[in-house]
Image: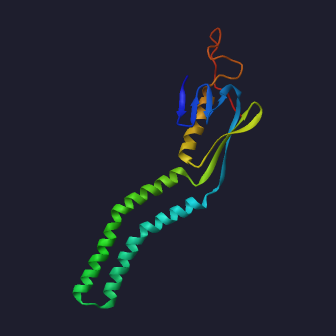
């Protein structure tokens, strides 16, 4: 038996797909397809907030420099205000690394609910629903690989008289 994918709730092997304790033998699965749900405005708003957090310190630094030069303060106060503004801008560097990492993970997860469906014993059944696009892609590809290498229905993997099982085509 070959394991194509495995995590806490999903296991895809050369014989079956197991999701949340439910087992679907590959020999009983027909066509597999996926559906994408609507965009999550919560995820998009979170990305916007990260973008604002990235731009905030830089905008504050630029405003501080502009304000210091425009007010016509004494040279000492101007230098102090410009220096403080530059420090605020430089402080954005370490923060930006953390925020870019969160933004990158947000895109890897996706902004939609994804569902994987299959025809099982003649009926459509939802195998999986997740908002994690990266995980969904890994599972979907694992199911495809498992079904490509599984023997067609009614044949055993060992075959007889040199007869080798080939990939099963799916509509």
Whether residue 114 is situated above or below residue 93 in the rendered picture: above
Residue 55 in which image quadrant: bottom left
Locate residue 135, reporting x and y percent: 54, 43
Residue 150 in which image quadrant: top right
| Residue at screen point 53% across, 28% down | 3
Whether residue 68 is situated above or below residue 159 in the rendered picture: below
Q: Is residue 100 left or right of residue 81?
A: right
Image quadrant in which the N terminus is located: top right
| Residue at screen point 57% across, 32% down | 11
Q: Is residue 149 left or right of residue 90?
A: right
Image quadrant in which the C terminus is located: top right
Residue 19 in which image quadrant: top right
Residue furthest to the left: 76
Whether residue 156 is situated above or below residue 84 in the rendered picture: above
Locate residue 84, reporting x and y percent: 29, 76
Q: Is residue 167 left or right of residue 86?
A: right
Which color scheme did the rendering employ for the protein?
rainbow
Q: Is residue 124 left or right of residue 158?
A: right
Residue furthest to the right: 122
Locate residue 54, reporting x and y percent: 42, 66
Please tell me how many numbered marks the rendered image carries.
0
| Residue at screen point 33% across, 80% down | 65
Locate residue 71, reporting x and y percent: 33, 90
| Residue at screen point 54% across, 25% down | 2
Residue furthest to the front: 21
């Amino acid at each position: 038996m070959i394991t194509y994918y495995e995590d806490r709730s999903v296991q895809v092997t050369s014989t079956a797909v197991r999701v949340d304790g439910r087992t679907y033998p590959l020999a009983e699965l027909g066509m597999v397809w996926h559906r994408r749900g609507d965009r999550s405005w919560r995820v998009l708003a979170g990305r916007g907030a990260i973008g604002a957090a990235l731009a905030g310190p830089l905008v504050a630094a630029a405003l501080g420099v502009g304000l210091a030069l425009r007010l016509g303060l004494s040279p000492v106060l101007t230098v102090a205000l410009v220096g403080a503004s530059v420090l605020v801008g430089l402080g954005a560097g370490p923060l930006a690394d953390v925020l870019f990492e969160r933004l990158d993970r947000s895109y890897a997860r996706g902004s939609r609910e994804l569902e994987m469906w299959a025809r099982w014993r003649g009926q459509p059944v939802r195998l999986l629903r997740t908002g994690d696009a990266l995980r969904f892609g890994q599972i979907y590809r694992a199911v495809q690989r498992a079904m490509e290498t599984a023997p067609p229905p009614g044949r055993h993997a060992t075959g007889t008289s040199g007869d080798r099982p080939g990939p099963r085509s799916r509509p």
